[in-house]
Image (cartoon, rainbow, N blue to C red):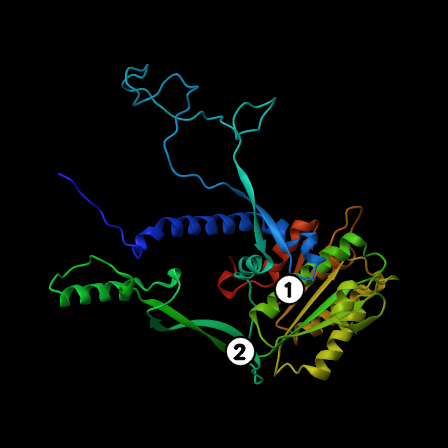
Amino acid sequence: MTYSFIISREDWSLHRKGEVDQHRHREKVREAIKKNLADIVSEESIILSDGQRVVKVPIRSLEQYRFRYDFRKQKHTGQGDGKSKVGDILGSDPGQQAPGKGPGAGEDPGHDYYEADVTIDEIEQIVFEDLSLPNLEEKKNKKLASESVEFRDVRKIGIQSNVDRKRTILEVLKRNALKGKPGIHGITPEDLRYKTWEVVPKFESSAVVLAMMDTSGSMGPFEKYIARSFFFWMVRFLRTKYQNVEIVFLAHHTEAKEVSEEEFFTKGESGGTRCSSVYQLALDLINARYPKDDYNIYAFHFSDGDNLTSDNEKCIQLIDQLLSKCSLVGYGEIEGPYYYTSTLNSFFKKLNHSRFLSVTIRDKSGVYPALKAFFKKPDQEGG
């Protein structure tokens, strides 16, 4: 008996394999990005660029699942008249190491890796998905808008990832019932239904973020790079997730001043350090422009902690005043590679306030944990 098969060019099952592979590839890319987030976030080529760069992320090659025997072993199963006996335990060596690891030159084959090009936008989606402005409170002035996605319609045309399976099956059942052949079979492109969405602005209480950075002579290239890395991602996070959020840039040595965004990220300073100057300026700006009843206020300060000893008590007093007005006050201290015992952070340990948070960064990989600490989602509190 001869069988003939006719495959329609419109048979959507033909696209299934490619779709599965694409999905696996996307998941591998996301997995690689997540494993390397701490290094990617502090990547110098990103921080010092205009934010439009493409980053290369190493990813394990995608292999098809299959059985593979280790032919160096003497015992196997399913190979005919081999040396295996009933009751033999077949398993991997407990001390097995990854290929290329261990003493001496290895003889095991390595894993294939390739570099995937990933845009900053793709990295942002993963970095920002767990971040939010903490302690947002209801205020009179509602100008801060964040985007929310709502599925509001079903159409016959759309992208494969938005297929509405339930409605598609209902269309198949209905069409087959009208033909007198009830059941789920013979799905055609005409049966497909796709969910469509609209981006809906969600208005929340207004917010202002005060970015404060130490630019004194004790802040070397490493310390300034770490501070700018944190603020680079903070600014992109706020502008990506929230509309109309205000960001005020303050730089200080012994004196503090409000600067433009460009000056904040590019201009260097020198001289001594008096951190109280920037806290006082922040309070003056809040009192003049950002009433507590209208704004959720956030203040983040990064320094190497090398402050004038005589200024520390005043810093404590001013931080207390900021805490009475701010939803959160964050202090990041950068420990340089060559020294030292901090003067400022030891004083801040006296503060015991739920809206004050301090972090210490010792190397570039500490930037991402600092972002997660300061911008923790409400459902992550205490986690």
Give residue 234's position: percent from left, percent from top.
64, 64
x 49%, y 27%: residue: 96
Residue 234: numbered disc: 1
Front residue of 307/62: it is 62
Would you identify the image quadrant in which residue 205 lies?
bottom right
Whether residue 352 sits left or right of residue 99 in the image: it is right
**Residue placed under numbered mark 2 in the picture:** 204
Would you identify the image quadrant in which residue 266 lies?
bottom right
Separation of marks 2 and 1 at Cα, in angstroms: 19 Å
Number of numbered discs? 2
Looking at numbered disc 1 in the image, what kind of residue is underneath it?
Answer: Met
Disc 2 is placed on an element classified as strand
Whether residue 88 sits left or right of residue 298 in the image: it is left
Above-or-below relation of 325 to 264: below
x 55%, y 73%: residue: 136
Front residue of 21/228: it is 21
Upstream in sequence: badge 2 or badge 1: 2
> In this orientation, does residue 297 appear?
yes
Q: Give the farthest residue toward the right.
A: 271
Badge 1: how crowded within 10 Å, few (<14), some, or many (20+)? many
Above-or-below relation of 32 to 70: below
Disc 1 is placed on an element classified as helix
Above-or-below relation of 268 to 88: below
Give residue 158's position: percent from left, percent from top.
38, 66
Whether residue 155 sits left or right of residue 327 in the image: it is left
Residue 138: numbered disc: none
Whether residue 191 sits left or right of residue 303 in the image: it is left
x 62%, y 59%: residue: 371
> In this orientation, does residue 304 appear?
no
Give residue 323's position: percent from left, percent from top.
66, 72
